[in-house]
């Protein structure tokens, strides 16, 4: 089993990166034969801007840019994808969303032809881990959990056929002890394995 863990946070000492590391350690603790690859979009300098070259690839006028093809190859090696991200304005960071916009493309993640969609990522199990500053009461009151599930679980991954195996929110990350969040992350890693 090979898992790709993707983060998008500019601070390598952030709780986001610590959670990603704990998920990775949980996977390898539960399954010593499992492999984990970490993709730090911020450190790697991934360009999230959807350009004319991306649009031309989408319309099959030319191949996708090399950075997109490299990310697709990285995903092709994975059995599971884990996205670990801070929640900014009730969504994922722009860089991570841009990674999805560019990489989960027509012809690779799905095939939109002749008026029907063919979902191509049924083999890729997805795990989502969002880190939010607000408390559970605020999320419930405003309906943010449902909104994120609709936007991300259904709007992105279901469209491509990639099953969302888990969707975890770690809340009050700015005001509480991080230890329980790190324990949750390790347990999630063990369950992924």
Image (spheres, rainbow, N blue to C red):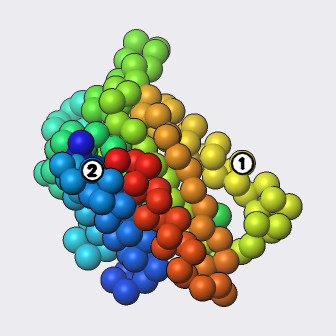
Question: Residue 162: percent from the left, percent from the top?
Answer: 42, 34
Q: Helix, strand, or loop for circle 1? A: helix
SS label for mark 2: loop
Q: Nearer the viewer, residue 149 or 111?
A: 149
Q: Residue at x 24, y 42 (%)?
A: 1
Query: Which residue sits at x=43%, y=64%?
Result: 186
Residues packed near mark 1 inside 10 Å, few (<14), some (14 to 19) or many (20 plus): few
Q: Is residue 22 visible?
A: yes
Q: Which residue is mark 2?
A: 31
Quarter of the image for residue 40 reads bottom left
Front-lying residue, 77 or 56: 77
Direction top: furthest residue: 114
Question: Which residue in the protein does label 1 denote?
Answer: 146
Q: Residue at x 36, y 61 (%)?
A: 26
Q: Does residue 73 lie above or below 21 as drawn?
A: above
Instruction: Return the x and y of residue 117 as percentages of the image width and height.
Output: 44, 20
How much space separates mark 1 and mark 2, taking CA atoms?
A: 32 Å
Horizontally, residue 35 falls left or right of residue 188, namely left
């Amino acid at each position: 089993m090979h898992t790709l863990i993707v983060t998008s946070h500019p601070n390598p000492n952030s709780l986001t990166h610590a959670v990603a590391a704990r998920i990775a350690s949980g996977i390898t603790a539960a399954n010593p034969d499992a492999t984990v690859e970490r993709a730090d979009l911020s450190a790697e300098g991934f360009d999230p801007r959807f350009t004319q070259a991306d649009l031309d690839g989408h319309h099959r006028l030319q191949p996708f840019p090399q950075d997109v093809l490299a990310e697709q190859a990285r995903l092709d090696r994975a059995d599971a994808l884990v996205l670990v991200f801070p929640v900014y304005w009730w969504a994922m960071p722009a860089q991570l969303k841009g990674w999805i916009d560019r990489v989960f493309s027509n012809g690779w993640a799905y095939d939109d032809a002749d008026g029907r969609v063919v979902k191509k990522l049924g083999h890729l199990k997805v795990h989502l881990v969002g880190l939010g500053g607000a408390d559970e009461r605020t999320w419930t009151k405003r309906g943010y959990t449902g909104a994120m599930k609709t936007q991300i679980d259904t709007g992105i991954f279901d469209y491509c056929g990639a099953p969302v195996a888990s969707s975890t929110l770690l809340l009050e990350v700015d005001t509480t002890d991080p230890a329980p969040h790190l324990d949750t992350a390790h347990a999630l890693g063990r369950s992924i394995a």
